[in-house]
Amino acid sequence: MREGKVEFRCDTCEKLLRTDASHIGDETACPSCGAALVVPDYEPAFADDTAEPLEHAGFDQAPETAWHQQTSDPAAPVNRSASSNAGRLKPHRGVAVLILGIFSWFTGIPFLAVAGVVMGASDLKAMDRGTMDPSGRDMTRWGYWIGLAHLILVGVILVLVCGGVLVAIIA
């Protein structure tokens, strides 16, 4: 059984949570938003902590600090979960998704938007499952929504153009 504590974020509300390493793999609910989640298999975040009873069904809400914040104090809690788990996660493609979404607007090529939306949707699902590095979630979301907005605009334009052609043919 692993000792220490693990630190991770809720996939829904992104609240920083902390629990005993003995809860890895357990299913429970986020104390903030109530979303169902599974404690991920990360390395212990607190090397010098001993196991102690935690509130909120085994969860302790960690103070809101930067997710990748480093500290020089050896006694302070250090979040090693992101870096130690990075080797097992697929790398995020947030930059590529964002570039596809933005370039689709500048070039007017809707296929770039389609690629960005498809990649973004699959990457966000992989991040939610815990199989992809979540550090690119914001870039992926932005690229997804920018590409989707372009596709919606292209759809509206097509409907208007096709409607205008039909009106011209009928008249």
Image: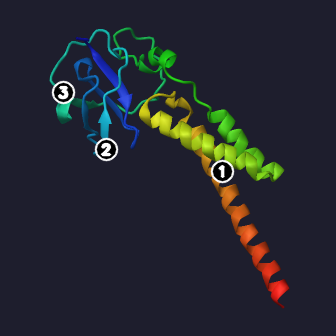
- In front of the other: 41 or 82: 41
Give whichever of discs 1 and 2 has the lower sequence position: 2
Q: Position of residue 80 (x, y in %)?
A: 42, 16
Where residue 57 sits, quadrant-wise, is top left
- Residue 140, relative to residue 149: is it above or below? above
Mark 3 Cα-neighbour bin, 10 Å: few <14, some 14–19, many ≥20: few
How far is mark 1 from mark 2, CA to CA? 27 Å
> Which residue lies at the image location 68% right of the left edge and 48% below the top edge?
114
Mark 2 Cα-neighbour bin, 10 Å: few <14, some 14–19, many ≥20: few
**How is this picture coloured?**
rainbow
Amino acid beneath label 3: Leu
What residue is pinned by disc 1? 146
What residue is pinned by disc 2? 35
What residue is pinned by disc 3? 54
- In front of the other: 57 or 110: 110
Q: Mark 3 or mark 2, which is nearer to you? A: 2
> In the rendered view, does 101 fall on the left or right side of 119?
right
Callout 3–callout 2 Cβ contact below 8 Å: no
